[in-house]
Image (spheres, rainbow, N blue to C red):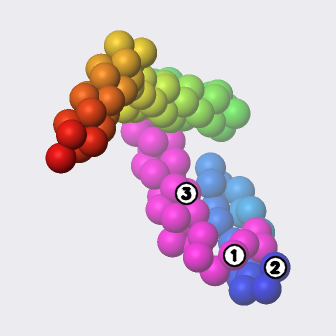
Amino acid sequence: MSDSLKIKLTIAGRVYPLTIAAAQEQSLREAANKIEAMIEKLEQNYAVRDKQDVLAMCTLQFAAQANQQQTVTKPTESANEKLHELIDLINVHLQTY
């Protein structure tokens, strides 16, 4: 890596040394902070004995959020068809001028 950094992130009490692109640092640190916050919240709300269980629950939460965001932002097939129809209509009108 040409512009690489060596950083250490702590997640669930474990230190993870990483070599990353400098541009990734802020994003990775924010992600690690979100994971830590989620772990803390889950530990407060549930009687979890093992960090592995907390990490699995955390992973499930983030995956569900990502799926939900993808579903919400993903255009439906009918929306895509409508957009293509509108683009075709605009092109027809532009060609007449």
Mark 1 vs 2, N-terminal side? 2
Q: Position of residue 28 (x, y in %)?
A: 57, 63
Q: Is residue 54 visible to us here?
A: no
The amino acid marked with disc number 2 is Met
Magenta-span inclusion, residue 7: no
Give the residue number, with chain letter if any, for mark 2.
1
- Depicted 83 relative to depicted 23: above or below: above
Find out whether the residues at labels 3 and 2 contact each other: C-beta distance under 8 Å: no
Mark 3 vs 2, N-terminal side? 2
Disc 3 to disc 2, C-alpha distance: 22 Å
Q: Magenta stretch: dominant SS?
A: helix
Quarter that holds the N terminus: bottom right
* Depth order, front residue of 97/39: 97
The amino acid marked with disc number 1 is Ala
Mark 1 vs 3, N-terminal side? 1
Report whether 93 appears left or right of 12: left
- Going 72% across and 72% down the picture, which residue do you hit? 20
* Depth order, front residue of 87/19: 87
Give the residue number, with chain letter if any, for mark 3.
32
Find out whether the residues at labels 1 and 3 contact each other: C-beta distance under 8 Å: no
- Depicted 61 relative to depicted 94: above or below: above
Q: Position of residue 37 (x, y in %)?
A: 43, 49
- Depicted 75 relative to depicted 39: above or below: above
The amino acid marked with disc number 3 is Ala
Disc 1 to disc 2, C-alpha distance: 7 Å
Give the residue number, with chain letter if any, for mark 1.
21
For marks 1 and 3, give the one nearer the viewer.
1
Report whether 15 appears left or right of 44: right
> Which range is magenta?
18-42
